[in-house]
Image (cartoon, helix red, strand yellow):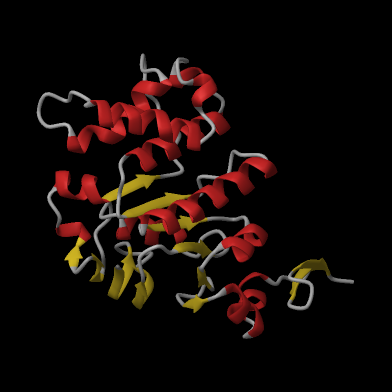
Amino acid sequence: MLRLDTLSVGYGAPRGTVLADLAVTVPPGSFVCVLGRNGAGKSTLMRTIAGLQRAVAGAALLEHADIAAMRPQTRAQQVAVVLTERAASPGLSVDDVVSLGRQPFTGWQGRLTPDDRQRVVAVLAQAGATAFAARLFDDLSDGERQRVMIARAIAQSPRLMILDEITAFLDLPGRVETMALLRDHARATGGIVLLSSHDLDLSLQLADSVWLLDGHGGMAVGSAADLIAAGHVGRAFDTAAVRFSPTLGRFELVG
């Protein structure tokens, strides 16, 4: 279970608090999409939950333990994080990078067991990365890199996966496959997948729950159908040029 306990996130002056007093509980096996326009605070929220950025107030709790206060190895065993930054791994093959997902469990020698190796092979296949497993990671396209980073996160066997805009470099079939993979992974393992995305249509179709940031410091939580019916999606995304149609479930040009 993931619980935001009156969590407030943000920065020092002049930006200050971005989101305040968030109180949400996420049950095991959930695929949650975090939506909002640029600057609404998605990445700030994701980094704070992951323990990479200090909370302004409150805490993010995983099984009643404060994620930010966990020992680094404990956090690595329970939380996997994939951010938007372009990762670089000079000299490492795709297989090497995915194998690093098992590092929190290998002990000081860092040796993979046969079970670890089997896990790496399986997640490469899950992420559609088997075909380029022997290639150097730094030689891959952006889309291929994202598949590898997702495979590494799954290899970690975490209770919580936090993925920030990881479908940005994938084509439409790739985005559909990846989001469906993450949803199915959460359900099959009982883990929690928290994904921030600009892909509104797919997120509304596939998410078990949506966290919708309104850009004014508020966050609405619920099923896609509930948020659409309550008008939250329109209020968060409508502009003078486009508006969200609750009946069609998509954006339309105005005029």
- Say if 188 sits above or below 239 in the image: above
Instruction: Provide residue 4's location: percent of width, then percent of height.
Output: 30, 72
Asked if residue 87 can be seen in this view, the reply is no
Front residue of 65 and 20: 65
Front residue of 195 and 207: 207
Residue sitting at x 30%, y 71%: 3
- Say if 155 sits above or below 165 in the image: above
Whether residue 148 sits left or right of residue 16 in the image: it is right
Residue sitting at x 62%, y 77%: 225
Q: Quadrant of residue 28?
A: bottom left
The count of marks equals: 0
Instruction: Provide residue 213's location: percent of width, then percent of height.
Output: 51, 70
- Say if 165 sits above or below 29 in the image: above
In this view, the residue farthest toward the bottom is 230
Q: Quadrant of residue 68?
A: bottom left
Quadrant the C terminus occupies: bottom right
Asked if residue 49 can be seen in this view, the reply is yes
Residue sitting at x 45%, y 75%: 217
Whether residue 244 sits left or right of residue 190 in the image: it is right
Instruction: Provide residue 112's location: percent of width, then percent of height.
Output: 22, 25
Quadrant the N terminus occupies: bottom left
In this view, the residue farthest toward the right is 255
Whether residue 210 sits left or right of residue 51 in the image: it is right
Residue sitting at x 54%, y 55%: 197
Instruction: Provide residue 184's location: percent of width, then percent of height.
Output: 50, 53
